């Protein structure tokens, strides 16, 4: 009897172990965008990666002394790799290669912590350099997404602590400074600060009311000062002129500025129930689609700024989630159309990495030097589209 009982215990243990091993298996993802994104990740770690905290900015790089197409990656590009990995992890958290890359890149952040005791990161690996509020904001969002993908409390705590630094850049005149030594308040620092603040507020609304207050305050200023009233697309930055009591506005328009504010509007609608925020998001989404998605021949393309385009796509995706009937999917589908065209027409380098033109043919001389920022940005767009398609398929089953 004891032998039979012992055999049963062994059999149960074996079944439990087999079940655990089955759970650990990586999910098989069948999606063209996902496969293309993984190829971009492989190229990044083959051609750009040096060590934890260290990537090349270009590969191949320009050998000309002093060329801008050379050197080590700054925090901006490093953060782009982090957010790219976060999107891959959200699709398949059991992918061991991605998880190993994630652990390595979070560890490597310490190479940017100058001085070492501060909870924020400087622009340059190891050599110091001043910190930028927007660079740190992208890292906040990357850590947040990694925390959600892996259920990792340490990543969430890290993200929340770094958010304190980003919000400390709020100006008494409104908005978030670009960096500590300038007087401009930029959409690229204010928009992601709002997004990050609301995301963390929604994690703990009873304890984080101050984050919602800050988000509303920064959002209101950015909308009032930096949104073009003619098309609701966002300008780049403003500097307050005390002598003449006015804001001097730089009216450049980039995809990521409108994208983060679309995302911010949707999140504030979610947090407050105020439909004004959702209306804001819709107006800017419509304006951005018209302003940035341009026809070249018979096909439509986004600007040759892959990393900037990431955040317009994120804005479109998050905005679309407010409409369960899929009536706003056409915003995301414009990206699907563009990236599908790029993949189908082999608008790529020899290693398979898509050109920054995404198939428009509007190439520039510097395109011969492959950019880490562009490569990571394109990969993140591919992962975002894959995740969107996979979730759409689940919804229809």
Image (cartoon, grey):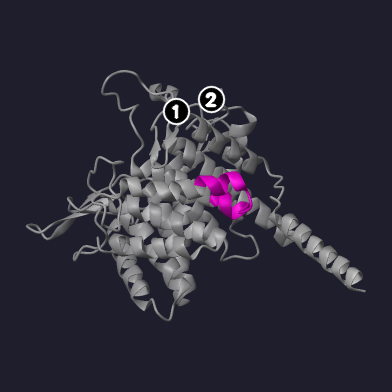
Assign the N terminus to one quadrant of the image.
bottom right
Q: Circles 2 and 1: CB distance less than 8 Å?
A: yes
Asked if residue 94 lies in the magenta stretch, the reply is yes
State left or right for residue 121 relative to residue 260: left
Residue at x 40% of width, y 58% of height: 261
Mark with earlier residue (2, 1):
2
Label 2 sits on a secondary structure element that is loop
Looking at the picture, how far across and down is residue 334, in whole percent? 57, 45
State left or right for residue 241 relative to residue 312: left
In this orientation, which residue lies closer to the viewer: 63 or 24? 24
Assign the C terminus to one quadrant of the image.
bottom right
Looking at the picture, how far across and down is residue 265, in whole percent? 43, 64
- Residue sitting at the far bottom: 206
Cα separation, mark 2 vs mark 1, equals 8 Å
Residue at x 75% of width, y 60% of height: 17
Asked if residue 318 lies in the magenta stretch, the reply is no
Looking at the picture, how far across and down is residue 184, in whole percent? 21, 52
Mark 1 closeness class: few <14, some 14–19, many ≥20 residues within 10 Å: many
Q: Can I make out residue 162 in this image?
A: yes
- Residue sitting at the far top: 64
Residue at x 81% of width, y 62% of height: 15
Q: Which mark is residue 370?
A: 1
Residue bearing mark 2: 349
Mark 2 closeness class: few <14, some 14–19, many ≥20 residues within 10 Å: few
Helix, strand or loop: magenta stretch: helix
Q: Which mark is residue 7?
A: none
Residue at x 40% of width, y 29% of height: 58
Q: Which residues are magenta?
A: 87-101
């Amino acid at each position: 009897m004891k032998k039979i009982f012992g055999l049963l215990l062994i059999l149960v243990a074996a079944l439990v172990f087999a079940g655990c091993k089955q759970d650990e298996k990586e999910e098989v993802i069948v999606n063209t965008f996902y496969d293309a994104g993984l190829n971009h990740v492989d190229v990044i770690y083959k051609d750009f990666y040096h060590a934890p905290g260290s990537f090349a900015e270009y590969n191949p790089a320009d050998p000309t002394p002093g060329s801008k197409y050379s050197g080590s990656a700054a925090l901006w590009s490093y953060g782009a790799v982090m957010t790219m990995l976060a999107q891959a992890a959200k699709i398949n958290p059991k992918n061991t290669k991605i998880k190993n890359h994630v652990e390595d890149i979070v560890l490597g952040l310490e190479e940017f912590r100058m001085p070492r005791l501060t909870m924020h990161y400087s622009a340059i690996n190891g050599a110091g350099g001043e910190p930028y509020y927007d660079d740190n904001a992208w890292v906040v969002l990357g850590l947040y997404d990694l925390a959600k993908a892996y259920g990792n409390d340490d990543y969430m705590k890290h993200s929340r602590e770094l958010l304190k630094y980003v919000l400390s850049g709020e100006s008494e005149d409104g908005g978030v400074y670009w960096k500590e030594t300038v007087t401009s308040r930029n959409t690229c620092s204010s928009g992601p600060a709002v997004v990050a603040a609301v995301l963390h507020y929604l994690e703990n609304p009873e304890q984080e009311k101050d984050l919602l207050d800050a988000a509303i305050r920064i959002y209101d200023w950015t909308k009032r000062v930096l949104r073009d009233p003619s098309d609701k697309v966002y300008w780049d930055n403003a500097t307050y002129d005390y002598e003449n009591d006015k804001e001097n506005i730089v009216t450049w328009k980039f995809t990521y500025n409108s994208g983060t504010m679309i995302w911010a509007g949707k999140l504030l609608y979610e947090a407050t129930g105020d439909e004004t925020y959702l209306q804001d998001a819709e107006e800017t989404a419509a304006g951005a689609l018209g302003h940035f998605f341009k026809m070249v021949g018979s096909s439509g393309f986004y600007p040759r700024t892959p990393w900037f385009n990431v955040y317009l796509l994120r804005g479109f995706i998050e905005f679309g989630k407010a409409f369960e009937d899929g009536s706003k999917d056409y915003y995301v589908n414009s990206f699907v159309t563009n990236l599908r065209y790029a993949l189908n027409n082999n608008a790529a380098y020899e290693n398979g990495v898509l050109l920054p033109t995404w198939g428009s043919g509007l190439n520039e001389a510097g395109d011969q030097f492959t950019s880490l920022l562009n490569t990571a940005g394109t990969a993140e767009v591919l992962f975002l589209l894959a995740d969107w398609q996979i979730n759409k398929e689940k919804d229809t089953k």
